[in-house]
Amino acid sequence: QVQLMDSGGGSEAPGGSLSLSCATPDITKIRFMAWFRQTPGKEREGVAAIYVNWGTTYYADSVKGRFTISKDNARHAAYLQMNSLKPEDSAMYYCAAASDGTLWYNNAWSVPGRYNSWGQGTQVTVSS
């Protein structure tokens, strides 16, 4: 397991933008970093993931074209830029890290149980 510190949530109007950050002491120990989100009574949903070694990215269909996941190895951090926000994007967002380098296969990147480290979560609220 690695320590993850996610931040950057807040409130925004529909159509607006927010940026989330996830810091870790040593990103070189991680193979996949991802963002999940969860609303009360629902399962945790994979939003986006990035393969740390190559920078390959993966997205849920619901956020493609609006959200961008990125990383900065020098800063040991990953980011989620969220544009064109919708009310249905409102949720608690969690950063996650996995030491498994095979999560590119069969959409495994979107399975919460494949990750062994989690941030504390940051709330995103989209409303007018």
Image: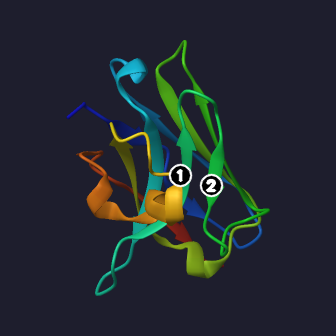
- Callout 2–callout 1 Cβ contact below 8 Å: yes
Relative vertical location of residue 18 with respect to residue 22 in this rendering, above or below: below
In the picture, the quarter occupied by the N terminus is top left
Q: Position of residue 68 (x, y in %)?
A: 69, 49
| Circle nearer the N terminus (2, 1) | 2
Relative vertical location of residue 79 with respect to residue 72 in this rendering, above or below: below
**Mark 1 closeness class: few <14, some 14–19, many ≥20 residues within 10 Å:** some
Residue 17: image quadrant is bottom right
Query: Which of the pair 26/9 is nearer the observer?
Result: 26
| Residue for badge 1 | 104
* Furthest residue in direction left, as rendered: 1
Query: Which of the pair 88/2 is nearer the observer?
Result: 2
Query: Which of the pair 61/16 is nearer the observer?
Result: 61
Residue 63: image quadrant is bottom right
Query: What amino acid is labelled 1 in the image?
Result: Trp
Q: Position of residue 125 (x, y in %)?
A: 51, 69
Q: Residue at x 34, y 42 (%)?
A: 98
